[in-house]
């Protein structure tokens, strides 16, 4: 019996050797570690080649919010997480990523296929206008030279405020809302067309509103770098 088992083991080893030899002759296509075990996760500033809705993006690994997105591939959407101010990648040991106050320090960007060509600035006159209060008496001065308008109660935007850049053909605009019972705006949302088929939705702390130009310029630059071109 031991001799029989030894012959069987020997036979299995021979088969493996034949397969490996054939793979070697074919250029190691069958035994490359990255194909056998998956492409390793990228780290640090290493650009990761991602595809969303057929659009190719190159995003530094340390900007990607979730570890399972830090390898090349096709994704339905990708998430970016950055620290404000400066829009720097969040370090692993940064306390901002572990506290309840993280929304006051972090900027989140979601990149996904766009369902409409209208971004936040486009919606001011086409959608938002009919949901805004008309009487703005006593409304506090908005930061950074922006205009502030309240949305009507009972509408889909009840409890939110709209801030926008006056006098611009395609203005910066954002909706700000409270995420607790304080009723004070805590975070804001704005979106921007990206490439031919994508939309980038940016959630940022309301404390960044006075520096909205810096936020806009730096995100535009980042989007241009990751697409190899610019926003759409």
Image (spheres, grey):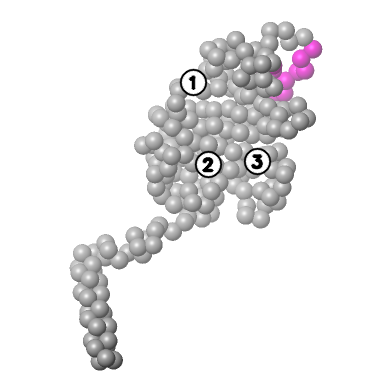
| Number of marks in picture | 3
Residue that lies at the very extreme toward the right in this rendered image:
138
2 or 3: mark nearer the eye: 2
Disc assigned to residue 79: 2
Would you name the residue on which mark 1 appears? 118
| 9 horizontally vs 228: left or right | left
Q: Secondary structure at mark 3?
A: strand
Residue 17 spot, x, y in % from top left: 24, 76
Q: Secondary structure at mark 2?
A: strand
Who's the residue at 23% across and 67% down the image?
23
Residue 100 spot, x, y in % from top left: 72, 44
Q: Secondary structure at mark 1?
A: loop
Q: CA distance from mark 2 to mark 3?
A: 13 Å
Disc assigned to residue 106: 3
Q: Which is more toward the observer, 210 or 188?
A: 188
In this picture, which residue range is highlighted in magenta?
A: 138-151
């Amino acid at each position: 019996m031991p001799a029989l088992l030894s012959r069987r083991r020997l036979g299995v080893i021979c088969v493996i050797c034949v397969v490996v030899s054939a793979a070697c002759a074919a250029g190691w296509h069958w035994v490359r570690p990255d194909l056998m075990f998956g492409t390793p996760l990228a780290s640090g500033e290493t650009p990761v080649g991602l595809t969303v809705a057929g659009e190719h993006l190159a995003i530094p690994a340390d900007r990607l919010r979730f570890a399972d997105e830090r390898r090349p591939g096709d994704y339905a959407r990708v998430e970016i997480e950055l620290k404000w101010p400066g829009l720097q990648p969040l370090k692993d040991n940064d306390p901002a990523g572990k506290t309840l106050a993280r929304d006051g320090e972090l900027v989140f960007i979601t990149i996904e296929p766009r369902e409409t060509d209208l971004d936040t600035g486009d919606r001011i006159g086409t959608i938002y206008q009919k949901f805004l209060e008309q009487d703005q008496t006593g409304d506090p001065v908005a930061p950074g030279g922006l205009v502030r308008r309240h949305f009507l109660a009972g509408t889909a935007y009840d409890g939110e405020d709209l801030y926008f850049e006056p006098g611009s053909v395609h203005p910066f605009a954002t909706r700000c809302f409270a995420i607790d019972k304080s009723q004070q705006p805590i975070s804001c949302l704005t979106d921007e067309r990206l490439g031919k088929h994508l939309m980038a939705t940016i959630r940022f702390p309301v404390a960044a509103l006075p520096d909205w130009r810096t936020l806009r310029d730096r995100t535009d630059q980042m989007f241009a770098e990751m697409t190899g071109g610019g926003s759409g």
